[in-house]
Amino acid sequence: MLTAEQFQGIDALRLDAADAAAQLDHDHVAALRLWQSVVQDSFHRSIEQFQANVSRTSRGNALCQLLAELTADYVEWMQWALGDIPIFAIAIEANPELVSQRIGPCALVYFAGRVLDDFLDRHHLYRGRRVTLLGSLAQRRGTGAESEALTVLLALLLTLEGLEQLPRGADDVMRQVITSLRRLVTGILMDCSEPQHWSEEFYEHLIELKNVDYWRILYDALDPKRSSKLYQLLCGYYALAQKLNDLEDAARDESQGRPNIVSVFRSQADSGRSLARVLPSVAASVTADLLQLYGEARQLSELEKLAALKLLGHSRSEMEKLGVFGPEQPEHLAVGVHRGGLAWHATVDEFVQRYGIDAIETTSCPVCHLNASAAIFRKQGFQYNRCSGCTHIFVSPRLRDDIIQQMNQEQSGEAPDPFLESQSIYVDHICRLLSARSIGRRLLDIGHGRGHLMLAARAYGFQVHGIDSDENNCASLRPVFGDHVQQLRLPARRLPWGSFDHIVMSHVLEHLAEPAVSISAVAEALQPGAFLYVAVPDSEALQFRIFGRLWDAVHPILHPQFFNERSLRHLIEGCGLEFVARIPSPTLTGPGVERWMRMFRSLGGDESGELAILARRKGASELSPAP
């Protein structure tokens, strides 16, 4: 919780910022208009010169001119990012003539960074507001390597154009811009660091490189010697701006594995801490940053102070929108979750409209990786394809995996999942099967759901461990299994707790975008001679032959994979495991078995439409070469 003193500081800043904004806008209205005109005119000249140079250099090549036009159109739209430049210029009493020569070229370099950032994060839609340059290229050239390569090349071309346009005699600006560029690119590389290298010190340095140095590219057009006392405060202001962006985008960044103030705080304290438990600490940290900047602003000269307070007022308002100052911190700060607002039955067009064209991605067969398939039907606008090689059925183009994980996070625990209860049907059958083939008693249940199999397996004498992507499922089982339960989202290249004698994956593979990655990790976690039990919906089941795409197991978002025995065997054996047998489903009896389920058995199928197999990792003698 924030202290009473902090709340007093926040309220004082609100009043001072409002007064400063009103005074600045009133006393310097003519200067603001002048500087807005200077910035816009310089920027437009640079954009026009960029297009003219591309046309001249390419001798009017149609493609080059189109690419330059698309680039110019995007960065013209992005010029709202230059809106603070007039305020800085007034505060530090910059020279209009010099700024007019420099700000347009510096802006080209700055917007090249925006284009590159869109490429790195695969943003085809900028915050739901406009198609990015990458998105425009994808619409014309298709989503793939060519569009991405063109995006990078255009970012490089913008950078070179901006540097070349800087006037003679502006060597100090050139040096500063190149230094900031070098640091920015270094920060982009750091952004790909593994989570074990994240720390608060790492994060603070990262945002200085990726956000503050990025802003310096523009500021150096006004004050290349960085002599103004406002400069240091602005460095802190843009570092805080990145932290607030992180609060808004925490779920997206976490799904992409990117460092974010929330994930860094969580990794520093306890990787198992929930978002709700971490956010109060984050809120206290960013509030302390804001109040420190407020104190520094009051020490500036009058004009610099007015500019600083107006900008800090924007930060305070943004923090208020994010719920940072809410009295009920853990619940109120759930704003860190970027909600998509779409349900599992949404169509492909709805996802594209909400997230942009990069919401979907094309793929070759996830089992045999052959890029040859035939479309068989569509559901919710998503296309199901049958691989010409292994006969596996898969969705392509499919919804991007990080969006699916976001939807899982948003809807976790909101309503009971009846399928998790149906997992109890075959638990005794599975336990008896594995007991009969036991080489040991260590068992891992991947995707344990409500834990029906784990509870039954413990009664059969197994030493049970479980992982699940849903923290709610894990939390309900920890009172029983303690640290033998862990929240883990597949794919994972390594599984916890060492090796096992048995691993169960019941209705997990059909959910995974790249099942081979997880099966390879499973193979590594099996002892020599150990067994893997896998169950999935069967694309050759009677239910599928009767109902086709209307079968409830056919779900393009939840089940992008649809196996048959041939394709599942290909996947298992391709990951180094030995196919042992197909496991027939036992006849179900009792009051829980519906009449329609018995009907499928009477027609020659089974009650569930399930494909279950048993695979094995070869024994030690089989794994070692003969002497």
Image: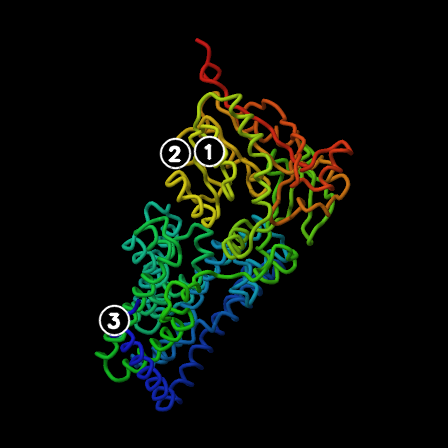
Which sits in the foreground, 473 or 220? 473
Residue 624 falls left or right of residue 296: right
Q: Position of residue 307 (x, y in %)?
A: 32, 80
The residue carrying pointer 2 sits among few (fewer than 14), some (14 to 19) or many (20 or more) residues within 10 Å by Cα, namely few
Q: Which residue is mark 2?
A: 497
Q: Which residue is mark 1?
A: 444
Tags 2 and 1 in contact by the CB under 8 Å rule? Answer: yes
Q: Quadrant of residue 225?
A: bottom left
| Amino acid under disc 2 | Trp
| Amino acid under disc 1 | Leu
Q: Earlier in the sequence, mark 3 or mark 1?
A: 3
Q: Which residue is mark 3?
A: 292
Per the image, label 3 sits on a secondary structure element best described as helix
Q: Position of residue 86 (x, y in %)?
A: 38, 79
Q: Earlier in the sequence, mark 2 or mark 3?
A: 3
Q: Quadrant of the C terminus?
A: top left
Q: Is residue 401 above or below residue 117?
A: above
Please name the residue shown 30% across and 58% down the image.
Answer: 204
The furthest residue to the top: 627
Q: CA distance from mark 2 to mark 3?
A: 45 Å
